[in-house]
Amino acid sequence: MIQLSITENIHNWLFSIMPEGVASIVEMVLIAVVYLTIFAVTGLFLVLLERRVAAWFQLRIGPNRVGFQGLLQTMADAIKLLTKELTGTERADKFLYNLAPYFVIISALMALAVIPFTKEFHAFDINIGIFFLIAISSIGVIGILLGGWSSNNKFALIGAMRSGVQTISYELSVGLSLLTMVVITGTLQLSEIIEFQKNGWLIVQGHIPAIIAFMVFMISGTAETNRAPFDMVEAESELGAGFHTEYSGMKFAYFFLAEFINMFIIAAIATTMFFGGWLSPFGITESLPWLGVFWFLAKTMGLVFLMMWFRWTFPRLRVDQLLTLEWKYLLPINLVNIVVMALIVWLNLTIRF
Amino acid sequence: METEVVNTNFKSEEYFINMGPQHPATHGVLRLLLTIDGEIIKKVEPDLGYIHRSIEKMCERDSYQQIVHLTDRMDYLSANINNEAVCLAVENALQLEIPERVKVIRTIIGELTRISSHCLWWGVMGMDVGALTTYFYGFRDREMINDIMEETCGARLTMNYNVPGGLMLDIHPNFVKRVKDFITHFKTKLPEYDRLLTGNIIFQKRTIGVGILSKEDAISFGASGPVGRASGYSCDVRKHHPYSAIDKVTFNEVLKTEGDTYARYLVRIQEMWESLSIIEQLIDNIPEGEHRVTTNAVIKLPKGEFYQKVETARGELGVYIISTGTKNPYRLKFRSPGFSNLSLLNHIAVGGKIGDLVATMATLDLVIPDIDR
């Protein structure tokens, strides 16, 4: 319990040297700094990973000059974006235009807070964890809608409207496929869901309906993060850059980073809900909880790679086909699936070790 | 008595949007004036002139050898075939006897150009429907052709290999070997194209039944090349009016009847196989002989009107020369395939979504300098 004692020691030390109110504020700031660091590092790393993976798919080498294997490339890009001029359109709604990136980035940050990286390693562990995640991740679309609406550009507006219709539709599937798994666990709290998986990962426990739920979740999760093949929002061959056409510099980087963090969050939720979160396979490292970070990241990166694989091999759907897929296929499948799952749990047909 | 209910509160409003001249899907500086109702396209109006260089007017100033160089800059993806068109027109007018060797090499180079153009088109087609990876696969194979061209012609894009009377230079000693290497390479890579894009369910959903062009419309709009053939209109110039060494080989004119975006896609993929087979039939027996017949330094065409058409990667390219017997043409008119193919865009794109327009435009395979000249 190495890391547990570290946080506990810091907690005790802070409360011993200053009054309680100040100490809690300092502690909150510390946690915020830690999470902002995780946010930035994850975002930058994922951008680099995507570029390397894309290069690998596309018979290229990818960025490998700045730092070892190009590890500092995205850092350099971030510095470049920081120093760039923030441009905007003339008759844009300035207030909403400036506000939009923060909606996107804050929703991504807040969703990151409840994800358990390993035992006891999360900003807060609430009993409605899954519900919180679904609710928070739907705030991001407001930012995209605002950005597209306020930037006084028709391409951006079309992109934003597409985003609205897409995200709202696919949230149903994300929610329902997660609910299918909640039927087994009987709890919404992420830490308890992981405890529950000590008898076998949920995708094994729930076998057929769980696998269907996983596939539905990955499809709708990809759609919710607006990534190809569902990148209607920024379909560059149709809309230029979509909703962030008029954004530049760090405001653009916020949208860009948030997209990657959202991808990470979707993969992390899938890891937690289907693949046992930070639990090691067959409990091989159960005595060392801090190794959970390794297992969690390994599983998450595997799923992130899957999403990148989608992106670099599939063409893009058309906007009406996108809605057909959700409302005519995924949603009915999901509704049947949740009933099947309930039957399986009721008849005690789950597989447990 | 019937009264018409006019709902003014929820009237959907058509709006106007500029697609281009700087837009990723227009492949150059084409400007489309779109009238859109939500996502649905009501009207497409192409606006040309952003890359107009008055090539036809410049032709009236230049000698016939110089004109060949201008044609590279029209449809730069089938530069060699454009060159060939002008050369053939001039040679026919002068009634020059062209060596067999020249004819065979011209046909091989022409078919290589067609494959390289279709490779690029395939990559861009994938990119337009959202699959970015195809772009690099198409360019990988195009690169091999470019290398062959570089070795033989000295240039990779605007080759200027044909001159009135033959070829600028003889082929490079490595030419035959490298072309054979390319054929074996490309025969393993073309099925890869199918696995990556053709069989993809999303791609098929995006293209089947989109942008349907009937045979009658194809003829009345003057569609040619793969666009016309996908609608069942047999319009291959190589079949109907053979030129160079094309009458020595057997090949199939690829015809489809559906006329939709997917049919146009399949026609081009099939055409690459046909081009490969044409090259295969010719590459082993290039006749020996001169690579060029000597012409006068100043070519003067006899008085009269001359027309020559060839099949470029995009369709039928016509060269119409009016000569008054001087060293310059009195008037030279190019009938470019892209111009006619663009004219039917409004006809087939209306009623579709923005995504359909982009997919349809990709299969028309527009090269803007060809349209604007």
Image (cartoon, coloured by chain):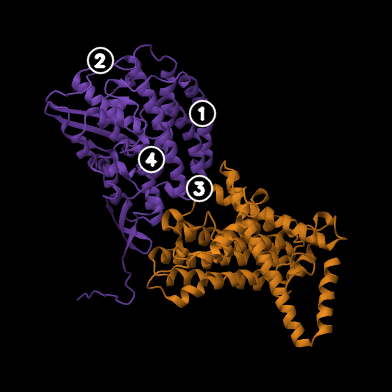
Residue B60 located left or right of residue A311: left
**Three-letter code, disc 3:** Leu
Per the rendering, the colour in which chain B appears is: purple
Query: How many angstroms separate mark 2 from mark 1 (CA)?
Result: 36 Å
**Badge 4 and badge 2 both on one subunit:** yes
Query: How many angstroms separate mark 4 from mark 3 (CA)?
Result: 20 Å
SS for dot 2: loop
> Residue drawn 34% across and 46% down?
B212
Q: Are marks 1 and 3 in contact (CB under 8 Å)?
A: no
Residue B42 at x, y = what percent? 30, 59
Q: Which of the two discs, 4 and 3, labels the residue nearer the N terminus?
A: 3
**Three-letter code, disc 1:** Lys
**Observer-nearest of B111 and A173:** B111
Q: Which residue is mark 1?
A: B187
Residue B14 lies in quadrant: bottom left
Disc marking residue B97: 2
Residue A335 seen from this side? no
**Screen quadrant of the N terminus of chain A:** bottom right
B216 shown above or below A31: above
Q: Which residue is mark 3?
A: B132
Q: Alpha-carbon neighbours of circle 1 within 10 Å: few (<14), some, or many (≥20)? A: few
Residue B108 at x, y = what percent? 39, 23
**Badge 2 and badge 3 both on one subunit:** yes
Residue B135 located left or right of residue B110: right
Query: How many angstroms separate mark 1 from mark 3 (CA)?
Result: 22 Å
Q: Chain of mark 3?
A: B
Q: Nearer the viewer, mark 1 or mark 3?
A: 3
> Residue drawn 53% across and 28% down?
B185
Query: How many angstroms separate mark 4 from mark 2 (CA)?
Result: 37 Å
